[in-house]
Amino acid sequence: MLARVLLLVATCLIFHAAFSTYEHLSYLKALERPEGPIPKSILIETVVALVLGIVGASLNAPPLKEITWSSEMRKRTIDEMDSRLGFANYVTRGRNIFTSRQAIPKQPSPREDH
């Protein structure tokens, strides 16, 4: 509950800081001074909102899952973990790919047997 309240307060502070910045820049524009520093109170408000948001998000996060080998082996068997091909032979594929079409004997198609 505290985490959600912190996130809500952080969100409100960010929106208020954005609105205050917009008002300040509008005020500077009305005075025909388009450049000027943002007041320190707005910067402090933004930093406080950032810290509250980080703390609220950290408290609101679910507990971390254990990702060790022993925790994985509790859920799976050794056959599931070691289910890969034992040996792969690429020589026959390479021979078929890199030979010319004329060197490969034509195999009869099933339609020609009629």
Image (cartoon, grey):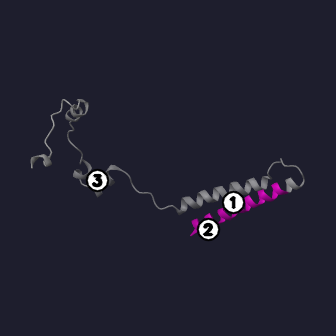
Q: In the image, is 66 to the left or to the right of 105?
A: right
Q: In the image, is 22 to the left or to the right of 68?
A: right
The question of residue 67 being in magenta is answered with no
Which residue bears the numbered disc 2? 5
Amino acid at pointer 1: Ile
Among numbered discs 1 and 3, the one appearing first in the sequence: 1
Which residue bears the numbered disc 1? 14
Which residue bears the numbered disc 3? 73
Magenta extent: 1-26
Q: Nearer the viewer, residue 18 or 49?
A: 18
| Residue 10, x across and y down, in percent | 65, 62
Among numbered discs 2 and 1, the one appearing first in the sequence: 2
The question of residue 4 being in magenta is answered with yes
Q: CA distance from mark 1 to mark 3?
A: 45 Å
Q: What secondary structure is found at the residue carrying circle 3? A: helix
Q: Residues within 10 Å of mark 1 (few under 14, many from 20)?
A: many
| Residue 58, x across and y down, in percent | 55, 58
The label nearer to you, 2 versus 1, is 1
Q: What secondary structure is found at the residue carrying circle 2? A: helix
Q: What secondary structure is found at the residue carrying circle 1? A: helix
The label nearer to you, 1 versus 3, is 1
